[in-house]
Image (spheres, rainbow, N blue to C red):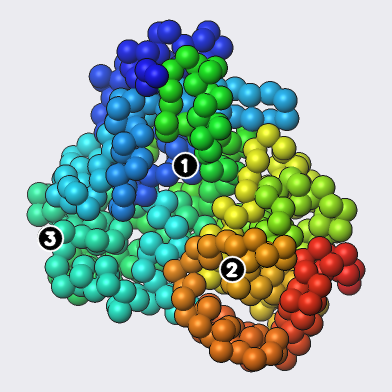
Amino acid sequence: MTRLSSQMLAVLPADVIRPNYDRSQVKPGVVHLGIGAFHRAHQAVLFDDALNAGDLRWGITAASLRSPAVRNQMVPQDGHYTMLVRDGGSEQARIIGAVQDVIVAPRAPQALIAAMAAPDTHIVTLTITEKGYKLDPATGALIEDDAQLAADLLSLEQPQTAPGYIVAALARRKAAGLPPFTAISCDNLPHNGTRLRNAVLALARRHDAALAEWIAAEGAFPETMVDRIVPATTPDDIAALTMRLGVEDQAMVKTEPFIQWVIEDDFCGPRPDFGAGVQITAAVAPWEEAKLRLLNGAHSGIAYLGGLAAIDYVHDVLALPEARIFVETLWDEAETTLSPPAELDVAAYRRELMARFDNPTLRHRTHQIAIDGSQKLPQRLLATIAARIEAGQGIDALSLAVAAWIRWQVGHDDLGNLHVVDDPLAVPIAAMLGAAATTQDRVTAILAFDAVVPPALGANLLFRDTLVRWLTILETYGARAALETFRPN
């Protein structure tokens, strides 16, 4: 089958939206680290909007920090791919042309550094997941015994981490008399800009104190919040799109109509005149907190409880009335810990979230959301629990979500179906749970694991007792029974 490409755009069906700009005139103003489905359905679309509006400075040079899989999908297609926006029975196909090249960093580290150090590059964005920052979730310090980071601490000739590439590129820019770029984290981390800045400065100081001072004085690491649901693409999705387009698109993404990018007004160079979907603000933290504790916290609870109940998709979990009660109660608990901005109507936001979760055409898999739970729980659930405890409030729904995460670590659902626990801490967690004789012992082991649970929270008796109660029900009767047992406070 012929692949999607620049040449094939003219033969696509008339209802497919195409780029309206001359790609040969586009300059590569953005380098993106960690290209995956989320970037292709989110930031790349918004930069494509800027190109369509006539500002041709915002082409994207993308990089995979691991495998060549995405490069092999995109480069034969001249960087083009289809974004399918699905909402109920409707579907809109749009070709995105913003990505000009994809570099496989382990194969061409100097090419990536050169792209980041180029005069036309003004912004570097990142979607590398929580574990890609090489920061201890509890302390925020560099994880110096991480093999990749240890290599970057010794030399940045061939960086192995995202902070390593940023430091190497900024060093080259400084030497060439160029200003730094604005580095924008687009991962679901609290204070993600500050964390990225701290990681970069800590690594830079180990190599060149003057470089670190220059980055601190001249660079910019704005806080951001990103929001769009992007389920994983399946072979069936690609086959169906091939039938629709008449060409094969191996890099397609599917998503929902909703898109949001809130960015702190802290740039050290040019930025696009962003349109709909982007909000520049003085304070991102309230937006970020609401998204992490409402959308992401509920998503984690749905993923682990639904996955344990052998339910594949988010909308099918929420077809259970007891699951909807659980989610609404989790939101009731989380909402009391928020300080929402004046522009955010939390009640309306909750209604919108439930409608997004209910979208059956997205087919968002619970197993996809369950990945990397140890990296996600601190900001999605544990921080909310700590705030509730400090305020003398109950933590029943939030604790059920955490108990379901613990139960997920056994590697099988309630029907005995095996699943891979895809998590950087899966091995030590499995070892500590395997050595525990009782439910209480398992809870005690997890609460003492300060790589995930802050020590003060781990020592809290209310949290321990609530976890033991829920984990006992999950281990004895299963996730569906736990949901059926659940009652709002």
Which residue is at 74% across, 60% downward?
A: 309
What residue is shown with label 2? 411
Residue 9, above or below 195:
above
Sequence order check: which comes first, mark 2 or mark 1? Answer: 1
Sequence order check: which comes first, mark 2 or mark 3? Answer: 3
Q: Is residue 310 left or right of residue 69?
A: right
Which residue is at 60% across, 55% downward?
A: 367
The residue carrying pointer 2 sits among few (fewer than 14), some (14 to 19) or many (20 or more) residues within 10 Å by Cα, namely some
The quadrant in which the C terminus is found is bottom right
Find out whether the residues at labels 2 and 1 contact each other: C-beta distance under 8 Å.
no
Mark 3 residue type: Glu
Q: Of 409 and 39, which appears nearest the observer?
A: 409
Q: Is residue 124 left or right of residue 451?
A: left
Q: Residue 123: x and y, percent?
A: 32, 44
Q: Of 237 and 361, which appears nearest the observer?
A: 237
Which of the labelled discs sits on residue 379, or is there none?
none
Task: Give the CA separation, mark 3 to mark 1.
Answer: 29 Å
Callout 2: SS: loop
Residue 52, above or below 257:
above
Name the image quarter holding residue 386: bottom right
Name the image quarter holding residue 486: bottom right
What residue is shown with label 3? 157
Q: Nearer the viewer, mark 2 or mark 3?
A: 2
Mark 1 residue type: Ala
Which residue is at 26% across, 29% downward?
A: 27
What residue is shown with label 1? 37
Mark 2 residue type: Gly
